[in-house]
Structures are given as C-alpha cells and as structure tokens.
Image (spheres, rainbow, N blue to C red):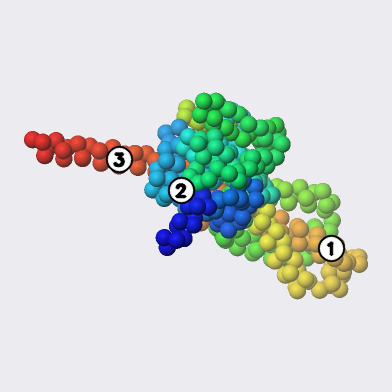
C-alpha cells in the first residue's frame, strides 16, 4: 500500500470529483467516470494519474435560486479529498437572456456544467468536451494548480463549440463562463431541458388516457361508418383532427396538474416563459409518444379485424394499405380526444418530471429547511454553552 501511494505521489495523482444531480446528469457522470481518465491524459496532461470519482447528490440552491458553487466545492473537496470538482446540474442557468453552458471558480478549484445547455441530440459529447475543458482550465495553473508535478501539462482543451464565448465577470479571481449565443443557443437550451425531462417516461403515467384512447379507437375499427368517414374526409381535415386531439390532451394535462407557471414578484417573466415552454414541449412529446403507441396498436387491430373484401364492399371501391392507414389515422385521433376528456397524471413523480419549476421549488424548500435546521442547531449550541457557563 505504501509503495503504491509513493508511486502515485511521484507520478502526481489528480483526483477529480463529479457531483451530479439525480436523473440525466447522474447517468452522464457514470458514463464519464469510465472515459475521463484516459481522455484527460490525452487532452490535459499525461504526466499525472487521473482519477475520477462520482457522487450523485442534488446540488443545493441558495436564496437567489442559484447554486453556491464555491461553498459547495470547498466543503465537498475537503470532505472527499478531491483536488478538483466539477458539478453537473439539470437546472438551466442564464445571464440575462444568454444561456450559460458552464462556469468556473478557480479559487474554489471547481466548475459547473448546466446539462440542459448541451442541447439535444449530441448532449453527452458536448458535456464531455465541456468537462475536459473545465478540468484543463483548473489544472492549467490559474489558481496555483493541484498537487503533483507541473511538467507534462498541456494547454487547456478548447471549448466545445465556436458558438460559445468567454466572459470574465471578475478578472481578479479569473472566474469565467461559457455562454451560448444567439437564437441557436436559446433553442439548444430549450431542447436540452426537454431532454432532461425525459418526456417518454410520461407514458406509464398516462395509463388512464391510453386505456380510454384504445377503447375509443377500437370503436372506430369495428364500425364501418367510421371507415366511410375516414375514406371521405380530405387528408388535410383528418390531419387537423389529429393536431386538435394532441393539443387538447397536452393542454388538459398541463392545466389539470397545475404545470403552468405564472410570474410573481420573485421570479422574472422570461424565466417563467422558459419553464412553461419546456413544460409544453415535454408534455407534447409525451403525448406524441402516446399517439404513436396508440396508432401502432390500432393498426395491428385493424389488420386483424378488417377483412379487405368486406372493406371494399362497404367503401364501394378497391382498397389497399392507404385505406387501412386512413381508418387507423381517424380512429387514433378520435381515441386521443377521448383520452383528453378524463385523463390525469397518476403520480406526483410524473408531474415533477415534466416541470422544472416544481423541481426547483422543491430544492428551494429543501434549502430553507436545511438553513432553518442549521439556525436551530446554532441556537441550541448557544443555549447549551450559556447554561454551562452559568
């Protein structure tokens, strides 16, 4: 054991701690832990031994709704024995209207990556490149460097894209941020927020809507009057019915479960708009996934139940795949409308997964509880010391 430690010290080991929010950031951190040591040796410095540790732990929020990176980093680095810390959060971060991909605090030897700002797709590649860049900045000697040798250090890896630029709000501490610029950056942030919400996971919580939709779409398969309507209607009108069904179901789910946020005195209007946009997109994608499942089930049902020769006699003309698809399209849209009439999310977990605002509110409440507990603990200690003195 002693020889191994001596060899590691001679090589100059650097331990990087990855602290991550549960969910998508935690999944990315697990994947990064296996790949980072080799990639850091290639991109940052090969004369040291790179070690990466992960810690899934919800990052706390302060009273302003931001992550206190410096205090969190100093506390965890001291407790875990890490040289550098990089935090991965699911929360979107912005300066004004400009999304932030990452921030760095060289004094605390810590960096913070906002996973939603990596966008969707290619989010993991962008997060990996960003983490390597932050570690390179922290290891490059801007704050005295971590323990170990200084030779073998390379220039910090470049930022992952030219669409991002640096800001230096505090030149003395050399803190920096990576921003996303332009409309493309805002769209990337929004798609990343939807990806972090993982909308396809809403499907199990839409079982009541799916049951009602399947029952109604089966009605459309079994009754030939629906066949005639589907064959007669112009495809544009059928498409309009399809859009109405999806929008109606998504709107009902958002309204019934209280996912729509209203701006108040403590929250900026643009922040609420961003959260509402991500909720609309998340629920919308979830409903589209439900519709795709419903369409597939109804198509299988139609192919089994509807005889081609009987359909020809009802419609009065030769039929083929087109007629089957039109009937299923009409029946699925009818089923989706029926699902919207009485559907709800069946678990609070699904509501939290679909809305950033609810998860952020939970974090703020947790912060307030922890701060209250600390204050009560300090008061109890003061009372105890006062009693001993008397």
The numbered mark, 2 or 1, whose residue comes first in the sequence reads 2
Cβ atoms at labels 1 and 3 below 8 Å apart = no
- For label 1, the residue is 323
Q: Residue at x 25, y 41 (%)?
A: 377
- For label 2, the residue is 82
Residue 209 visible in rendering: no
- For label 3, the residue is 374
Between 312 and 83, the residue placed more toward the observer is 83
Q: Is residue 360 left or right of residue 305?
A: left
The numbered mark, 1 or 3, whose residue comes first in the sequence reads 1
- Is 340 drawn above or below residue 382 in the view shown? below
Q: Quadrant of the N terminus?
A: bottom left
Between 150 and 294, the residue placed more toward the observer is 150
The numbered mark, 2 or 3, whose residue comes first in the sequence reads 2
Residue 156 drawn at (x, y percent): 63, 40
Circle 2: element type: loop
């Amino acid at each position: 054991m002693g020889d191994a430690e001596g060899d590691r010290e001679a090589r100059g080991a650097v331990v990087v701690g990855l602290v991550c929010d549960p969910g998508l950031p935690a999944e990315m951190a697990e994947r990064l832990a296996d790949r980072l040591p080799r990639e850091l040796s290639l991109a940052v410095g090969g004369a040291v031994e790179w070690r990466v540790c992960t810690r899934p732990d919800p990052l706390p929020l302060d009273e302003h709704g931001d992550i206190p990176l410096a205090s969190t980093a100093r506390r965890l680095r001291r407790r875990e024995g890490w040289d550098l810390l990089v935090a991965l959060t699911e929360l979107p971060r912005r300066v004004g209207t400009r999304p932030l991909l990452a921030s760095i605090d060289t004094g605390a030897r810590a960096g913070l990556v906002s996973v939603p700002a990596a966008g969707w797709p290619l989010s993991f590649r962008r997060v990996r490149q960003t983490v390597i860049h932050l570690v390179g900045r922290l290891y490059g000697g801007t704050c005295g460097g971590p323990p170990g040798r200084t030779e073998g250090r390379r220039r910090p890896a470049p930022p992952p894209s030219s669409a991002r630029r640096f800001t230096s709000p505090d030149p003395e501490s050399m803190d920096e941020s990576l921003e996303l610029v332009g409309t493309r950056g805002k769209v990337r942030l929004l798609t990343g927020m939807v990806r972090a919400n993982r909308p396809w996971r809403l499907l199990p919580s839409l079982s009541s809507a799916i049951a009602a939709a399947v029952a109604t779409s089966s009605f459309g398969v079994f009754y030939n009057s629906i066949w005639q309507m589907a064959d007669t209607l112009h495809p544009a009108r059928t498409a309009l019915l399809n859009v109405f069904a999806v929008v109606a179901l998504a709107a009902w789910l958002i309204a019934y479960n209280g996912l729509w946020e209203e701006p108040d005195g403590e929250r900026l209007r643009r922040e609420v708009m961003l959260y509402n946009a991500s909720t609309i997109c998340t629920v919308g994608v979830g409903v589209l996934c439900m519709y795709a499942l419903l369409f597939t089930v109804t198509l299988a049902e139609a192919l089994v139940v509807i005889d081609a020769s009987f359909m020809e006699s009802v419609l009065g003309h030769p039929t083929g795949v087109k007629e089957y698809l039109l009937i299923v399209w009409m029946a699925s849209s009818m089923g989706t409308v029926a699902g919207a009439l009485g559907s709800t999310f069946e678990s609070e977990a699904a509501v939290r997964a679909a809305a950033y605002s609810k998860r952020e509110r939970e974090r703020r409440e947790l912060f307030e509880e922890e701060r209250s507990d600390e204050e009560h603990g300090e008061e109890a200690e003061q009372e105890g010391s006062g009693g001993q003195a008397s």
